[in-house]
Image (spheres, grey):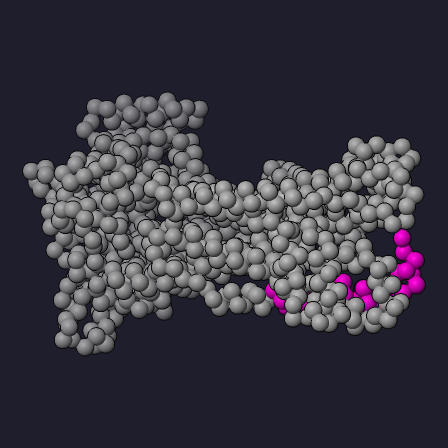
Amino acid sequence: MLRATLKTALAHKGRLALSAIAVVLGVAFVAGTFVFSDTLQRTFSDLFGTIQPDVVVSPGPQGDAIVLPVEAAEIVAGADGVDVSAGTVQVSGVTLIGADGEPIGTTGAPTLGVGWLTDEALSPLSLVEGRAPQSDDEIAIDTEAYADGAFAVGDTVRVVTPGPSVDAEIVGVFQFGVTGSLAGATLTAFTMDQAQTLLLGGPGWTAVQALGADGDSQDELAATVREQFASSDISVAVQTGDEVRDESAAAITEGLSFITTFLLVFAGVALFVGAFIIVNTFSILIARRTRELALLRAVGASRRQVTGSVLVEAALVGLVGGAVGLGLGVLLAVGLRQLFVVVGVDIPAGGLVLAPRTIVVSLVIGVLLTMLSAWFPARRAGRVPPIAALRDDVVLPTRSLRLRTVVGVALLLLGSGVLAIGLLGDVPNGIAFVGAGLLLVFLAVALLSAVISTAATAVLGWPVRRSPVGRLAVRNAARDQRRTAATAGALMIGLALVTMIGTLGSSATRSVDATIGDVIRADFLVSSSTFEPFTPEVAETVQDVDGVTTVSRIAIAPASLDGERPDPDAGGPGSDFGTAVDPETVDQAVAVEVVDGSFDDLRASPQGDRTVAVDTGTAEERGLGLDSTLTVTWPTGEDEYRVVALYEQTGPLTGVIVSRSEFERLDLPPTDNTLYLSADESADPEQVRSDLEQALAAYPVVTLQDQTELADQVRGQVNQLLALVYALLGLAVVIAVLGIVNTLLLSVLERTREIGLLRAVGMLRPQVRGAVRVEAVIIALFGALLGVVLGLAFGVAIQQSLADTGISTLGVPWTLIAVVLVVSAVVGVLAAIVPARRAANLDVLAAIATE
């Protein structure tokens, strides 16, 4: 039986090819995602694990500063078992300015400043040219920044720091670690004294690192260091090198999980669409091979053997498709890596990571997808009676659509109810109900599409019904309702997602326009082009510009409401962000809807009456009200606050808000994240802008925008994301097109004798081609209409459920919808080219003689 199965698979290899392609594309996306994610994770793991000390000492969770005092390094050095130790300085927001006046580095990537460590045992930096900095006006830079800025040793460059900006001479170029890659980040090294003065404002360390003697345990050394600090009044956190590495790996995994999930979602869509093609392929092939299967039954094959034979064929298709998809996935990972390089994230050119898990998952997905998709056709094959081998016109019986109709209607009613609860009911996590309701509605439509296909194809074929060719095409499309629905369903999925994303994108851009117009009151905004905090010198500079009446400064710092001390450079698990505003000017910057209390009561009282404003969402979640007590943990320590204002989350303000004076009391860096500038109504806006641009020329890391430019920037970001999503969804559409081609090719094969008879009674070749084309267009438009209607409904439902989170204005992408429908008709014509040509070129006599 196995030998017969293999021979049958080889005999039908051409007919199975398009099904294999569907598997290949879906598996390629899965494999490419895993290979790329594993490669990216290894890159960052190598990046942070290049030089791994045995013990790392950092400011402790109960401390009152984000900088260790100088004596911390002396305490570590005096601990038993410490062989080598050194204090380190590393601060973000240190940016090199190129000769063209533009910042060096990748937007969003860290721009770091460090103190040069003279002990090579602890330093991850190794000189490749020049020497280490030795005076306050000298720096060394990493090889990537050196190349990007086209610098030369001896050049004098501008260095922008969170404090003052300085001019310094490049005296050395260093490589970071083994590969030299910083994945898009930049690293500027100062003398240790200059790093402390410039980056920390005075003596101190951001961490102290230590190495023990050979053979000593990291845990024992860490315990010894903790004992040393126990007798001091310095609060520190002591971690082993392995703990630091594991934390870095966990943070990397969490950071990369979004990319992995994002790509795997589209891989799942591609595989789901491919399942429709596989079901169609095996259904048509089994219908075509009914007599062959009956002969197998007649010579003694059991139902289970016939069913198993079809499943083995499916497994072979899946295995081949999975293997080819794995290879294509590696190429896809190469393309993704190059894409990251283009946007500035440099991934070393070393080999890709092809983990055993990736190979196994790719092959298993390929085999399981085809076997599960072929299960129902295989069961039908097993039901072929042996007596059918004696008949010339045997046709597999088809089941009634009654059960499908009942289940589809039930799912539609259930999904509509769940959706209504999510949209109208006062339930927690309403978006989950909306998602569940949409899924049920989608399944209902997928089931009911076969029921409505006859009526739908009749309506879509109405313009051509007077033509004999048109009538034939409509009847062919309506002949097998399940097949038409499955073929159209593949296209429906892709276009439903495209329309849904388009609706959400249009709603997001319209909401941005409305929000900026209603919320932003300031005339101009100043923000960092590198997403790093910038020096307070900028605020002092713009305040002196003629025509500027108010400068409202907003700063952000990591904060936790769950008792976990946040990292001073980022949020992290369990962390949020606290915002500092000037209560006297914030209402001139943004429109804040205060529900209860007043921002005027925000202050940092030396008597301990510290106050905070909280958004209504956080207040409801934590049961807070006016005068409630809230504990907030900052990088510098923990404090209790009295809630003096509840406000609706809007624009740039969210979470906990304190006064600027509170940030100063907390010894948080005196930097700014955004400046909101109001101009005198009597001043010429163009002149004010010109003066501001001239004043800000000395600070290349910041950008000046008005409300229109801000809206354009946000819309551009939304459109870039939409373009990426559309490109990924295009894979599903391509697979759907292949499904139409596959169905038509097999349909032509199935109707070979019928086409021969039509030709024999006078049907011309152009008419045969026309009938196949019209059938393809009808099927494509049927799937497109279902997809557009579903996608629009889903987009509206999701927008309504997200109205309270910022997407408050509905936008319908009418242009996109029109383009989708036109493109679908064109897709139908293109998909029919090969099947139509094959049908028209059939030999009449040979076709009539076909059994």
> Which residue does the image show at 24% across and 40% down from the upper left?
619
Image height check: is 165 above or below 250? below
**Viewer-proximal residue, 365 or 355?**
365
Q: Is residue 297 part of the magenta span, yes or no? A: no
Residue 573 at least partly seen: yes
> Which residue does the image show at 31% across and 23% down from the upper left?
224
**Viewer-proximal residue, 267 or 161?**
267
Residue 113 at least partly seen: no
**For the magenta stretch, what is the residue range?**
824-851
> Which residue does the image show at 43% across and 37% down from the upper left?
250
> Which residue does the image show at 49% across and 61% down from the upper left?
723
**Viewer-proximal residue, 553 or 105?**
553
Tell me the quarter of the picture where residue 688 sits: bottom left
Q: Is residue 667 left or right of residue 720?
A: left
Tell me the quarter of the picture where residue 38 sits: top right
Where residue 152 appears, as percent x and y from the top left, is 40, 63
Work out which quarter of the rendered image holds the N terminus and state it. Answer: top right
Dominant secondary structure of the residues highlighted in magenta in the image: helix
Q: Is residue 655 left or right of residue 802?
A: left
Q: Is residue 846 part of the magenta span, yes or no? A: yes
Q: Is residue 78 left or right of residue 452?
A: left
Where residue 671 appears, as percent x and y from the top left, is 22, 53
Where residue 180 appears, as percent x and y from the top left, is 47, 50
Q: Residue furthest left?
A: 607
Where residue 774 appears, as percent x and y from the top left, is 70, 67
